[in-house]
Image: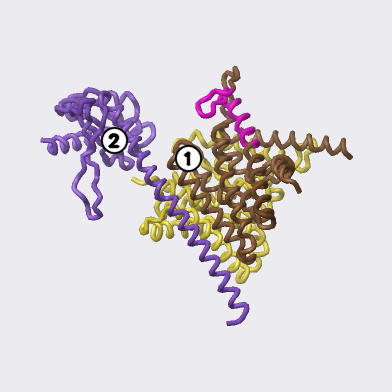
Chain colours: A brown, B yellow, C purple
Amino acid sequence: MDAFSEFIRGITRDNPILGLVLGLCPALAVTTSVENAIGMSVATAFVLVCSNVFISTLRKQIPSAVRLPIFIIIIATFVSIIRMVMEAYVPSMHAALGIFIPLIVVNCIIIGRAEAYASKNNVFFSFVDALGIAAGFLLVLVLIGGIREILGTGQIVAFGYTLLSLPINPAVTTMIMPPGAFLTIGIIMAVVNYQRAKKRAKGG
Amino acid sequence: MEKALLAIFLEGVFIKNFLIIQFLGLCSFVGVTKDVKSAAGMAGAVVFVMALAATASYMIYTYILVPTTMTFLDLISFIVVIAALVQLVEFVVRKNIPALYRSLGIYLPLITTNCAVLGVVMLNVQSEYNFIQSVVFGISAGIGFTIVMLMMSAIRERSSFVRTPSSIKGLPLAFLIATMLSLAFVNYFWVIPI
Amino acid sequence: MSESNKDTVVVIGKLVLISVIAALLLAITYIPTQAQLERNIMAAQEAILGELVPGAENFDPVEGPANVDGEREILYYRALDGSGNIIGYAFFQQQTGYGGPIMVAGAVDASFSTVLGMDVLRHEETPGLGARITTPAFQNQFDGAPVQQLALRSGGGSIDSITGATVSAQAVVTALNTKINQIKTAEA
């Protein structure tokens, strides 16, 4: 088991959204722009890394009968911390993400990684696993956010910089409304399935 | 004048529909809508826990956290309450109504991590609803959740008879169906001014 | 004590321990972030006041008497120019409208003769009717309006009411009048 392949696994095979199909709610709800997608991913990454490292450190101390309540308390603590910090120092981002910051608590990715990985592996690999999963989450969120923002508003603006603009007139506002989220993820998943099937056909 | 209960109700059911407008509870949405029966079971369990959680969390927030100025513990106490409630409901239902347990039982443990339940609770606090408003919002969100779960599962049952390319089968198809449902909700219900 | 009882005690002890640590960690984060939050709110309020009184460099809060908890409420602000002269007074005032409380920010010049501006920060009025108190058409009437005539036209003043939403428009006017009179008395 080497660290690099564990990291890459989080982006490809165990990609939280496209591979494990976990954490769909934030992936669809806050991806109205690239900026929000990045903000959400960073907040989730913080919680994921902290809780994975913490749970892995304590894994021999946590009684297995009450491990889920303990995981939930640990995760809720880190979520509350990032929520208070964001509210104080990046209030506009906090307002844009709304209740999806507290809802990181019930993001199945985090409790799923705690249960499936951090409670069984050492601290270093739990850390790497969290980084990999967080990177996979970030990439998919930015992809969905990018597609929706460019089609929905005709340009991608993140943190004050215009990254890309397309001459679409009028812009397809539906894309930044709820239906656009479902459409985008449906098409991305279909493409991923197609690629996987092709790979399998070649290999087999 | 406080916000009318009817307005809160309609918002909960249609305009701010949890599943396809606010994206809350999507895991169960794509997970258990393959057939109508399990969708109905899941929806029933969610509505029940939602109403209970809205009541319990209101009590805790108003009578414990606010007087002691410990509102920063809101999130952690809500999630613990929801987890405890789910355990309690599971225990009571299994003991007293075994028939109901057989149909709802397997969905109950999934509800702790269902963001729809925590979503109701957090939105109630955020909107500063009073007790009645909180409960009404909890119930209406549950009804909206149920309606969409049933619609979705019925469409997915039918769509299994349709020949689709293999890459679209399964989740991608579910999301494309959700796209159309969501389009309908957005266009019909966002035009009603409340 | 039997072996299984001991285990139960250990498990419960660990649960309690971890809850206490969690609560402590949160309390430690809460204090600095709360302070920052209050600074953010202050900054946001000063930004709003700054728009109402364009030439102001500084706002000096005037506090009321301490309440039972020893906290002092800020009654209004003296708007000061670069050299510290009072060029006007700015304030926030809450007034009950038709749908609920309306939060109004306002400013008046140093001689209490002209309203410098008005802004509605928060309201729960009916969309399309009372909510029109936030439109520029309604708000711009207040810029430079003489305090003497600060009333709706129906009451002999210079402010056009909103058709179908007199209660909302009146609430805004009342809020300004009440506060301006209060400040006038306090400063005299």
Residue A21 location, quadrant: top right
Residue B22 location, quadrant: top right
Q: Is residue A159 above or below residue C21?
A: above
Circle 2 crowding by C-alpha within 10 Å: few under 14, some 14–19, many from 20? many
Q: Residue furthest left?
A: C188
Of B183 and A84, which appears nearest the observer?
A84
The segment highlighted magenta reads A139-163
Could you give the CA–CA distance between mark 2 and mark 1, rounded to whole angstroms? 25 Å
Quick one: SS at disc 1?
helix
Is residue A157 within the magenta segment?
A: yes
* Quarter placement of the C terminus of chain C: top left
- In this rendering, which labeled residue sits more in front, label 2 or label 1? 1
Residue occupying image coordinates x 44% and y 47%? B126
Query: Disc 2 designates what residue?
Result: C104
Chain identifier of the residue bearing label 2 in the image: C
Q: Residue furthest bottom?
A: C1
Of C156 and A197, which appears nearest the observer?
A197
The amino acid pointed to by label 1 is: His
In the drawing, does residue B64 fall left or right of residue B45?
left
Residue B3 image offset from top left, x and y in percent: 39, 45
Query: Disc 1 designates what residue?
Result: A94
- Does any portion of residue B164 appear in the rendered image? no
Residue occupying image coordinates x 26% and y 30%? C58
The amino acid pointed to by label 2 is: Val
Residue occupying image coordinates x 17% and y 36%? C183
Q: Is residue B15 above or below residue C86?
A: below
Is residue B1 within the magenta segment?
A: no
* Quarter placement of the N terminus of chain C: bottom right
Of A152 and A164, which appears nearest the observer?
A164
